[in-house]
Every structure is written in structure tokens, then in C-alpha cells.
């Protein structure tokens, strides 16, 4: 007869990848992070859209609708990330040129 398992063993996960080289400037670091975030959301959008198309071909319209909604959320997140990058870039250029609100 075997003994019952009394020991909890956590699964071993691979070590996380070493982070890529991040720029020293906080704005550049934020921009790089937002670019990676936008890219990941764009890939997620494409995958969800493709999966929903496959579900539509199998007449699973209710499930496909759920995937389409998730795809649209991913697309909106990607757009928001790109807008944040654009705002940061405009602010950096404005500060670099010396343009400040209220100065003539």
C-alpha cells in the first residue's frame, strides 16, 4: 500500500529572462515599455480576431462574439499605449526646443 502524499511541492518554473537593456532616461524607458505593451496587445488582438473567425466557421457565434469583444479591448489598449507614446514624444520635443506654455 502506498502512503498518501503529505508534502506539497511547488512546480518549478523556468527562470525569467534577463531584462533587455533599458535606457537611462525615464521618458525613454517609459516609451520603450509602452511600445512593447502596444506590440503585445496588437498580437493579442490579431490572435483573438483569428480565433473568433475560426469559431464563426464552426457556427459558434456566441463564443466568437466573446472573442471579438476581447479583441476590441486589446485594440483599444494598444491605441491608448500608442497615444501615450505620442504624448510623451511631443512633451520631450517641446521641452527640448524650449517651448513652454505662457512664454512668448
Image (cartoon, rainbow, N blue to C red):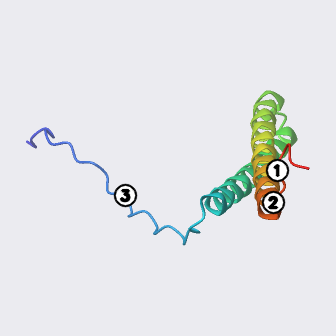
Q: Relative to residue 59, is residue 17 depicted above or below? A: below
Q: Secondary structure at mark 2?
A: loop
Q: Are marks 2 and 3 in contact (CB under 8 Å)?
A: no
Q: Are marks 1 and 2 in contact (CB under 8 Å)?
A: yes
Q: Residue furthest front?
A: 104
> What residue is shown with label 3?
13
Point out the frontmost of discs 3 and 1.
1
Q: Relative to residue 99, is residue 48 depicted above or below? A: above
Q: CA distance from mark 3 to mark 1?
A: 50 Å
Q: Position of residue 67 (x, y in %)?
A: 76, 37
Q: Position of residue 30 (x, y in %)?
A: 64, 56
Q: Secondary structure at mark 3?
A: loop
Ranked by sequence position, the earlier of labels 3 and 1 is 3
- In this rendering, position of residue 36 left or right of residue 95: left
Q: Secondary structure at mark 1?
A: loop
Displayed quadrant of residue 14: bottom left
Q: Relative to residue 45, is residue 69 depicted above or below? A: above
Q: Position of residue 46 (x, y in %)?
A: 79, 52
> What residue is shown with label 1?
100
**Residue displayed at 67% across by 53% down:** 37
Q: CA distance from mark 1 to mark 2?
A: 6 Å
* Residue 40, label in figure: none
Number of marks in the rendered image = 3
> What residue is shown with label 2?
98
Ranked by sequence position, the earlier of labels 2 and 3 is 3
Amino acid at each position: 500500500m502506498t502512503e498518501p502524499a503529505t508534502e506539497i511541492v511547488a512546480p518549478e518554473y523556468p527562470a525569467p529572462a534577463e531584462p533587455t537593456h533599458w535606457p537611462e532616461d525615464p521618458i525613454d524607458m517609459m516609451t520603450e515599455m509602452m511600445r512593447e505593451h502596444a506590440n503585445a496587445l496588437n498580437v493579442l488582438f490579431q490572435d483573438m480576431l483569428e480565433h473568433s473567425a475560426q469559431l464563426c466557421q464552426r457556427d459558434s457565434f456566441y463564443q466568437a462574439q466573446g472573442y471579438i469583444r476581447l479583441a476590441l479591448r486589446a485594440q483599444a489598449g494598444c491605441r491608448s499605449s500608442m497615444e501615450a507614446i505620442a504624448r510623451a514624444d511631443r512633451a520631450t520635443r517641446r521641452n527640448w526646443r524650449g517651448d513652454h506654455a505662457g512664454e512668448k
